[in-house]
Amino acid sequence: MPPRARKRKPRAVVDTSVLVAGISGFREPFVPGRNSSADVLHEWAEQNNFVWLVTKDILDEYKEVLKHLGVRPSLIGKVINLIRERAEGVKVRSSAEISPDPKDDAFCRCAESGDADFVVTINPKDFPEERLKSKIVLPTELIG
């Protein structure tokens, strides 16, 4: 009998909206089910349940937005370093304009170049599913 093939972990691009909402959910003691974005981040950090895909542009946006929102620099550093250590870096092979929001093109291009199974976002309108191979999901669809 052939050995069982290991199930491939889903590959995902995480929009900045989910990261920001998730980090805000870490302010209080973490309570599962209270903040779906925090649940996504917590499950990833604890269980490594999907492959988080990033590019330098995405990491730069995460840092910039968190800084703009007044997140403590030490926390930004911890978050970015954790993501950088555990995520998979993607080399983008395109400069296609895919999203109606040009800031989200980096996420769309990462999803396409990294063969993402899904893009997790709070703003699905910025990710035209008909132009992407990835499924667009809300944080609530990813947890559990």
Image: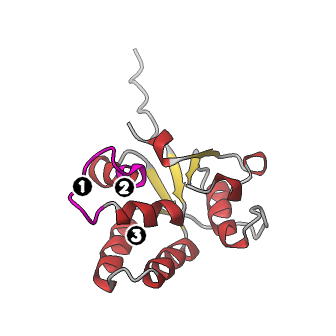
As for residue 32 lying within the magenta part, the answer is yes
Q: Which residue is mark 1?
A: 30
User: Can you give x and y, in whole percent of width and height, for residue 124 in the image?
Assistant: 65, 52
As for residue 19 lying within the magenta part, the answer is no
In the structure shown, which secondary structural element does the residue marked by tag 1 occupy? loop
Question: Magenta residues, as a range?
Answer: 26-39
Q: Which quadrant holds the C terminus?
A: top left
What amino acid is at disc 2? Ala
Crowding at mark 2 (Cα within 10 Å: few <14, some 14-19, many 20+): many
Magenta stretch: dominant secondary structure: loop
**Residue situated furthest left in the rendering:** 29
Chain-order first, disc 3 or disc 1: 1
Q: Indicate which label's residue lies in the foreground, 3 or 1.
A: 1
Q: Position of 123 compared to 89: left or right?
A: right
Q: CA distance from mark 1 to mark 2?
A: 8 Å
User: Can you give x and y, in whole percent of width and height, for residue 28 in the image?
Assistant: 24, 62
At 45% from the left edge and 51% from the top edge, which residue is drawn?
Answer: 51
Q: Which image quadrant for residue 86?
A: bottom left
Labels 1 & 2 near each other (Cβ < 8 A) = yes
In the structure shown, which secondary structural element does the residue marked by tag 2 occupy? helix
Q: Which image quadrant for residue 107?
A: bottom right
Q: Which residue is mark 2?
A: 38
- Viewer-side residue, 55 vs 91: 55
Q: Which residue is mark 3?
A: 84
User: Can you give x and y, in whole percent of width and height, for residue 65 in the image?
Assistant: 50, 78
At 78% from the left edge and 51% from the top edge, which residue is drawn?
Answer: 131
Chain-order first, disc 2 or disc 3: 2
Height in image: 139 above or below 71? above
